[in-house]
Image: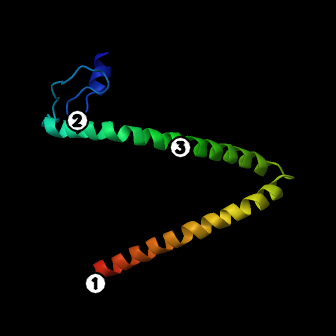
Amino acid sequence: MRNYAHNLIAENGMMVGMGFGRVAPRKGYKAAAAKGETTVVKHVKNVALFFAAPFIGLAYLLALPVIGFGLLLWIAGKAAMKNATARPIALAIAAPFVAIAFVTVGPIVGLGALAAMGAKALLKA
């Protein structure tokens, strides 16, 4: 058990996942300085999270059916791709959606690449 506990000591001298609190650092390790936040900052964060929590929950509630339906489509698509008879039909059904995705995402990716190349050229000059 002693070797197990010594293996759990992180570089800052804290026991990881054991709840023992502060442990004296071993040779070669420095004790980390306490980086405590002020109580005002903690309270402001807590209040902000309190007001944001319903919106975060609503986002999860709205995203769950979309993600679940997408997961079902993904599993069905994988199964259809394994079947030689259903494969051409599945590809024909998926083709318009793939085209819409490329038309939607393509310009955004192109503008991002153009901006990155321009920024690189500006920084070189």
The type of residue carrying mark 2 is Glu
**In x, y percent, where is residue 125?**
28, 84
Tags 1 and 3 touching, CB below 8 Å? no
Per the image, the residue denoted by label 2 is 11
User: Residue, x 82% and y 58% (percent of image)?
Assistant: 88
Secondary structure beneath label 1: loop
Displayed quadrant of residue 120:
bottom left
- The relative height of residue 51 versus residue 125 in the rendered view (above or below) is above
Tags 1 and 2 touching, CB below 8 Å? no
Q: Of the numbered discs in the image, which one, if any, rests on residue 125?
A: 1
Please indicate, yes or no, whether residue 103 appears anywhere in the rendered image: yes
Secondary structure beneath label 2: loop
Q: Disc 3 and disc 2: Cα gap in Å?
A: 42 Å
- Pick the front one: 36 or 46: 46
The type of residue carrying mark 1 is Ala
- How many C-alpha atoms fall within 10 Å of the one at disc 3: few (<14), some, or many (≥20)? few
Secondary structure beneath label 3: helix
In the image, taking residue 2 as reference, residue 111 lies left or right, namely right
Q: Mark 2 or mark 3, which is nearer the start of the sequence?
A: 2
Q: Disc 1 and disc 2: Cα gap in Å?
A: 43 Å
Q: Nearer the viewer, mark 1 or mark 2?
A: 1
Displayed quadrant of residue 69:
top right
**In x, y percent, where is residue 87?**
81, 55
Q: Nearer the viewer, mark 3 or mark 2?
A: 3
Please indicate, yes or no, whether residue 36 appears anywhere in the rendered image: no
Q: Disc 1 and disc 3: Cα gap in Å?
A: 47 Å
The type of residue carrying mark 3 is Leu
Per the image, the residue denoted by label 3 is 62
- The relative height of residue 125 versus residue 21 in the rendered view (above or below) is below
User: Residue, x 41% and y 42% (percent of image)?
Assistant: 55
